[in-house]
Image: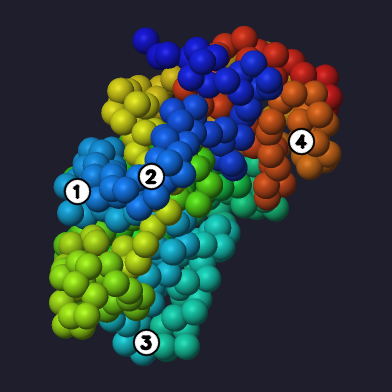
């Protein structure tokens, strides 16, 4: 069913890349789209950039299909931190308001909220919980809904959480979490950098106020691109904190300084974006993530993880496999000296990474069973 050919994914001829939770290989179609746009400018100058508006329009439309929303709710971003910072800085907090997050969140989903303490906002952190017998609280693991319910108060305005924790691979049940926040009139802000392109993320059906993601992990796009989903209800609350020529409805009538900003998601695209990178990410969305559903990709990734585990020496490398509802594209391995093992594996042609005391194995759908078998055998011998 899946097209896993070397022509589309040429890195397979060079090495086995299992680092899609870090910097993934660039999809060949994305590289082609970037080259096409840049070459058009080389040959035709400003006339070569005439597709700017079409690329932006198509990007919003195809990204909206992935997120189960409409194009008016999607913005192109440079990275996840840009979107999170715009939301945090623009949110109408009052002194004493609260944001709840997890103690081991990725920095991009921590510092924007921490900065709001200067506005009198309290950042409350969910404690680390070991929800599996195969690990302990000495490493980042997971958080629990029971702890969230304990921390929530009448002053809680936002829950800011990663869909998938970048160290342990623990995936939140977004449908359950969205219902929890919706019932309490709390805005749920989700960092989906470690899930979008790997797991389903249904923004509107699951009552999510905002979804941010970088584009160079599971989406396999260029470094320096990403996207932001915002609900109309959330946008109606936010103040604009970054502004430029592209934020107002009068377009290129640059001497008209009337303050008339967009009310849809274009309010965050305040100035010129990296349009070549947007073209590259658009190609990924068109040729991969609408050809295959998120559910199909998820199931294939889980199948590849199962192949890997079946050939692993678990006396040396202990896989942390979460329950199905908390499973993700990241398969963490508990072992001695994970950083050294990552370097040795990379030297042998297997790209894996170490974070938070785990060795992270993160295959994508285009990897094959033979690659995962060889990777398990090599890592077992190196360990």
Residue at 28% x, 48% y: name it: 50
Residue 128 visible in the picture:
yes
Query: Vertical placement of 270 versus 79: above or below?
Result: below
Viewer-side residue, 127 vs 49: 49
Q: Which residue is mark 3?
A: 96
Which class describes the residues within 10 Å of circle 1: few (<14), some (14-19), or many (20+)? many
Closer to the eye: label 4 or 1: 1
Is the C-beta separation of discs 1 and 2 under 8 Å? no
Q: Earlier in the sequence, mark 3 or mark 4?
A: 3
Is the C-beta separation of discs 3 and 2 under 8 Å? no
Which class describes the residues within 10 Å of circle 2: few (<14), some (14-19), or many (20+)? few
Q: Which residue is mark 2?
A: 44
Is the C-beta separation of discs 4 and 1 under 8 Å? no
Q: Which residue is mark 4?
A: 342
Measure the alpha-carbon separation of dots 1 and 2: 30 Å
Measure the alpha-carbon separation of dots 3 and 2: 55 Å
Viewer-side residue, 311 vs 77: 77
Query: Vertical placement of 293 versus 275: above or below?
Result: above
Classify the position of the N terminus by image quarter: top left
Query: Vertical placement of 356 versus 383: above or below?
Result: below
Query: What mark, if any, has residue 71 been given in the picture?
Result: 1
Closer to the eye: label 4 or 2: 2
Q: Earlier in the sequence, mark 4 or mark 1?
A: 1
Viewer-side residue, 151 vs 294: 294
> x, y percentage for residue 136?
66, 47
Q: Say what secondary structure mark 4 lies in.
A: helix
Measure the alpha-carbon separation of dots 4 and 1: 40 Å
Closer to the eye: label 3 or 4: 4
Measure the alpha-carbon separation of dots 4 and 2: 46 Å
Which class describes the residues within 10 Å of circle 4: few (<14), some (14-19), or many (20+)? many
Residue at 64% x, 16% y: name it: 13
Q: Earlier in the sequence, mark 3 or mark 2?
A: 2
């Amino acid at each position: 069913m899946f097209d896993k050919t070397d022509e589309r994914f040429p890195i397979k001829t060079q090495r086995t890349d299992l680092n899609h939770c870090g910097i993934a290989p660039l999809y060949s179609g994305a590289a082609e789209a970037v080259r096409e746009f840049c070459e058009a400018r080389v040959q035709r100058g400003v006339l070569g950039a005439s597709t700017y508006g079409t690329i932006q329009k198509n990007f919003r439309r195809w990204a909206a299909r992935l997120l189960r929303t409409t194009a008016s709710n999607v913005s192109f971003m440079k990275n996840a931190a840009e979107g999170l910072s715009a939301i945090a800085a623009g949110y109408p907090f009052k002194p004493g308001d609260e944001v709840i997050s997890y103690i081991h969140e990725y920095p991009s989903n921590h510092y924007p909220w921490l900065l709001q303490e200067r506005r009198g906002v309290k950042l409350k952190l969910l404690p680390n919980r070991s929800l599996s017998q195969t690990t302990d609280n000495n490493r980042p693991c997971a958080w629990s809904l029971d702890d969230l319910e304990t921390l929530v108060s009448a002053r809680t305005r936002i829950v800011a959480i990663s869909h998938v924790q970048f160290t342990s691979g623990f995936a939140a049940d977004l449908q359950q979490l969205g219902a929890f926040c919706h019932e309490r009139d709390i805005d749920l802000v989700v960092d989906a950098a470690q899930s979008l392109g790997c797991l389903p993320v249904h923004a509107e059906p699951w009552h999510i106020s905002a979804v941010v993601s970088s584009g160079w992990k599971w989406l396999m796009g260029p470094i320096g691109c990403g996207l932001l989903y915002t609900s109309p209800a959330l946008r109606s609350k936010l103040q604009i904190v970054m502004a430029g020529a592209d934020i107002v409805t009068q377009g290129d009538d640059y001497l008209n300084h009337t303050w008339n900003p967009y009310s849809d998601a274009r309010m965050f695209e305040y100035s010129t974006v990296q349009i070549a990178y947007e073209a590259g990410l658009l190609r990924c969305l068109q040729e991969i993530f609408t050809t295959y559903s998120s559910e199909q990709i998820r199931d294939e990734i889980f199948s590849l993880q199962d192949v890997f585990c079946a050939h692993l020496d678990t006396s040396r490398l202990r896989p942390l496999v979460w329950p199905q509802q908390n499973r993700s594209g990241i398969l963490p391995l508990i072992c001695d000296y994970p950083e050294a093992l990552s370097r040795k594996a990379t030297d042998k042609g297997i790209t894996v990474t170490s974070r938070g005391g785990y060795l992270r194995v993160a295959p994508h759908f285009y990897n094959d069973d033979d690659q995962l078998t060889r990777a398990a055998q090599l890592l077992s011998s190196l360990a």
